[in-house]
Image (tube, rainbow, N blue to C red):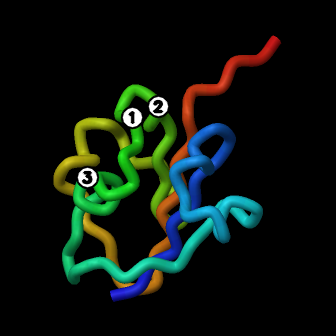
Amino acid sequence: MQITFKLYASLTDHLPPEARRSNQVLIEVPDGATLAQIIEPYALPMRLVHLVLINGVYVPPEERDTRSLKPGDTLAIWPPIAGG
């Protein structure tokens, strides 16, 4: 199945070079793939996987190892952000 995978801020460095400018890439993942299975090949440091959204809806940390996606979903991940 195909999903849109978006990474923000410093995490865009983990996308393929041609996708970094747009911060997103269309990827093929197995049916029923979990967030953890999708994130793993991109070697994202888990300490930087802070805000996770599926189709704009927050996914709490305790659901990230078991939550699966559906065809056409958009997975977006933000690192911790400091401001002031």
Q: Which residue is drawn at 76% across and 62% down?
A: 21
Say what secondary structure mark 3 lies in. Answer: helix
Give the residue type at disc 2.
Leu
Q: Identify the residue at the far front of this view.
A: 17
Q: Residue 45 carries which label?
A: 1
In front of the other: 84 or 5? 5
Q: Mark 3 points at which residue?
A: 36
Q: Identify the residue at the far right of this view.
A: 84
Q: Distance between the residues labelled 1 and 3?
A: 12 Å
Other residues around mark 1 within 10 Å, as few (<14) / some (14–19) / many (≥20): few
Give the residue type at disc 1.
Pro
Say what secondary structure mark 2 lies in. Answer: helix
Q: Of callouts 2 and 3, which one flags the residue occurring earlier in the amino acid sequence?
A: 3
Instruction: In the rendered view, tell whether residue 16 sits above or below residue 43.
Output: below
- Relative image position of residue 58 (x, y in whole percent): 47, 48
Q: Residue at x 22, y 80 (%)?
A: 30
Residue 62 in view of the camera: yes
